[in-house]
């Protein structure tokens, strides 16, 4: 992927998610991988620990998939958790990615289902793209040199952080 | 699996603490979390039963800092040790870049250690990996126990040589950071992108 394509794809994903936030009056939307890494988030994330949320969503994703298998389904494509003030709607956009929508107006649930179904295909495509680092990012260097430099810095940081 | 997120300019590496039930995996993570400076750690998440056994996983992120404009994060997980959480262990192990195998030095737990090692091998295979393909470090925990298992006895029994072996008393924080440092170094040394 070229730098321009990378930037364009990222901008498109951000625009789709921003529009989802405003159209469905969401507090937050998070795009998360199956193993609990955050791809991107939009909306307000100031009130929660988004890294912990992604890890837990990854766990839910895996557990739910196994539960689905036990009852003879390939997966459950939508999960809804309803709280007193806040609710969370989780939908699979591909086998590897899910969208988690946090919202407060339970009356929006119909709209949320419709809009997430509409955008899932494109979000899945953008999420699954090979996000090859581009010129303004670390991959602008020759891979061997970049990796070796990365390792050197990372090992130094590890030693500083973990040294008893 | 190393996760490179260009959106957030983030590189994530996953480290999993594996071992028999009550061998001290969660204690390792708790002590490690307590021993790190605030700027280097995120919130610890524990999914435990009322008796404090891990039911799914414990997790916290270690923020290494910025390298070439990318943030680098280690994601530290434990698996549930009890036999009946086998499916959960496999799910947590998926995508692991490195494993710390925590051995209970109590002689009475010797069979449980071997069973857990076999379970680790089986689950790595189920995740399309193998114990020879990722960095694995053994930690002999609970070294303060009377007649503790001899260091090296588990390797001899299972016929596997880990990259490194550490002794620990995780409940007192001894050997915890050294183990984490070693597995983190091993994972990073193999990383290329």
Image (cartoon, coloured by chain):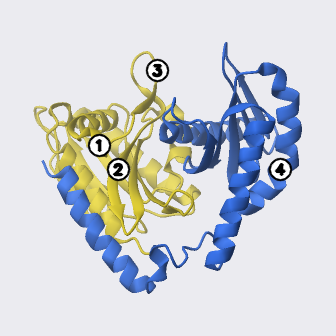
Picture residue at 32% right of the left edge, 77% below the top: A149
Q: Chain of mark 1?
A: B
User: Which is in the foreground here, disc 2 or disc 3?
Assistant: 2
User: Which is in the foreground here, disc 1 or disc 3?
Assistant: 1
Whether the residues at callouts 2 and 1 have beta carbons within 8 Å, the answer is: yes
Whether the residues at callouts 4 and 1 have beta carbons within 8 Å, the answer is: no
Whether the residues at callouts 1 and 3 have beta carbons within 8 Å, the answer is: no
Picture residue at 28% right of the left edge, 37% below the top: B33
For disc 4, the marked residue is A119
Q: CA distance from mark 2 to mark 1?
A: 7 Å
Q: Quadrant of residue A148?
A: bottom left
Dots 1 and 3 on the same chain: yes
Q: Position of residue A130 (x, y in %)?
A: 64, 70
Q: Secondary structure at mark 3?
A: loop
Q: State the blue chain.
A: A
Counting residues from the start of the chain, the first of labels 1 and 3 encountered is 1
Chain B drawing hue: yellow
Counting residues from the start of the chain, the first of labels 2 and 3 encountered is 3
Relative to B182, is B81 above or below? above
For disc 2, the marked residue is B63
For disc 1, the marked residue is B39
Camera-side residue of B20 and B181: B181
Disc on res. B162: none
């Amino acid at each position: 992927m070229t730098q321009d394509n990378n930037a364009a794809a990222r901008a498109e994903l951000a625009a789709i998610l921003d529009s989802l936030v405003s159209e469905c009056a969401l507090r937050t939307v998070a795009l998360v991988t199956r193993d609990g890494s955050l791809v991107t988030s939009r909306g307000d994330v100031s009130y929660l620990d988004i890294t912990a949320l992604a890890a837990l969503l990854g766990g839910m994703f895996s557990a739910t998939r196994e539960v689905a298998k036990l009852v003879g389904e390939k997966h459950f494509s939508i999960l809804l958790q309803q709280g007193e003030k806040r609710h969370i709607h989780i939908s699979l956009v591909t086998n590897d990615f899910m969208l988690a929508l946090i919202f407060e107006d339970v009356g929006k649930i119909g709209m949320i289902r419709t809009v997430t179904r509409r955008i899932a295909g494109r979000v899945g495509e953008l999420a699954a793209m090979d996000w090859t680092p581009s010129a303004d990012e670390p991959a602008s260097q020759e891979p061997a040199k970049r990796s070796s430099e990365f390792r050197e810095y990372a090992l130094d940081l590890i030693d500083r952080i973990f040294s008893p | 699996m190393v996760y490179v997120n260009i959106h957030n300019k983030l590189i994530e590496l996953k480290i999993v603490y594996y071992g028999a039930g009550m061998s001290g995996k969660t204690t390792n993570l708790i002590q490690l979390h307590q021993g790190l400076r605030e700027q280097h750690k995120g919130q610890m998440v524990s999914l435990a039963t009322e008796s404090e056994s891990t039911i799914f996983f414990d997790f916290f992120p270690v923020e290494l800092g910025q390298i070439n404009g990318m943030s680098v994060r280690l994601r530290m997980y434990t698996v549930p040790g009890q036999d009946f959480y086998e499916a959960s262990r496999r799910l947590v192990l998926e995508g692991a870049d490195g494993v710390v195998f925590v051995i209970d030095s109590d002689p009475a737990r010797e069979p449980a250690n071997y069973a857990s090692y076999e379970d680790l091998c089986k689950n790595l295979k189920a995740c399309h990996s193998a114990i020879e393909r990722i960095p694995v470090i053994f930690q002999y925990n609970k070294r303060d126990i009377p007649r503790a298992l001899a260091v090296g006895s588990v390797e001899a029994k299972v016929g596997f040589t880990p990259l490194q072996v550490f002794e620990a008393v995780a409940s007192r924080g001894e050997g915890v950071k050294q183990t984490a440092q070693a597995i983190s170094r091993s994972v990073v040394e193999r990383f290329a992108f």
